[in-house]
Image: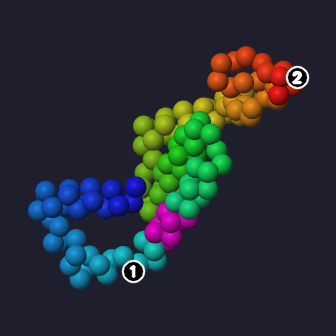
Amino acid sequence: MYVDSVACNFAVLWANGSLADAFTKDSLLSISHGKVLAIIFNNAAIGITTALFLQRLNSILKTFASALEIMFTAVLCWFIFGIPVDMFTFIAIAIVSYAVLLYAHNPVDNTPKAGKSSVDGTQKSNASV
């Protein structure tokens, strides 16, 4: 996914004619600011955490984790950088929060039940094993 993201960013910069501008001395030095490094390390930690989630969670919880990540990123950008949270972002945060609340009240249980086949829904008896 990261290689795909890098390739797409290079393609967009090349198409705009600003690929060379991305590698000037001033552009590369702008990465060394504390806030930028904090964001880089934070996103690296999010990537590692997401990899752990992908191993352990079902697809619904993965979607919620991704939505919550975007929500927290928007709020943290408001605190750290002063980027205003507009009405659309607030509505998105409210929808994600409500969806998480609904799911918390009635989560999906994907654990296999003893004696049931998950393929055709028929029960297996212990005597036939």
Colour mode? rainbow
Residue labelled with disc 1: 32
Q: What kind of residue is marked 2?
A: Ala
- Give the crowd class for mark 2: few <14, some 14-19, many >=20 residues within 10 Å: few
Q: x%, y% of residue 19?
A: 17, 67
Residue beneath the point at 58% across and 49% down: 54
Near-viewer residue (1 or 105) = 1
Q: How many numbered markers are drawn?
A: 2
Q: Residue at horizontal 20%, vertical 56%?
A: 12
Name the amino acid, label 1: Ser
User: Is 121 located above or below residue 15 in the figure?
Assistant: above
Q: In this view, does 16 lie to the left or right of 95?
A: left
Q: Is residue 79 something that shows in the picture?
A: no
Name the residue nearer the viewer: 75 or 28.
28
Q: Distance between the residues labelled 1 and 2?
A: 68 Å
- Which residues, given as a range, are shown in magenta? 38-45
Residue 123 in which image quadrant: top right
Indicate whether 11 appears above or below 124. below
Instruction: Say if 44 sits above or below 68 in the image.
Output: below
Residue at the spot 22% in from the left edge and 71% down from the top edge: 22
Magenta stretch prevailing secondary structure: helix
Q: Regarding mark 1 in the picture, which secondary structure is present there?
A: helix
Quadrant housing the C terminus? top right
Identify residue for label 2: 127
Residue 54 appearing in the image: yes
Q: Is residue 32 above or below residue 92?
A: below
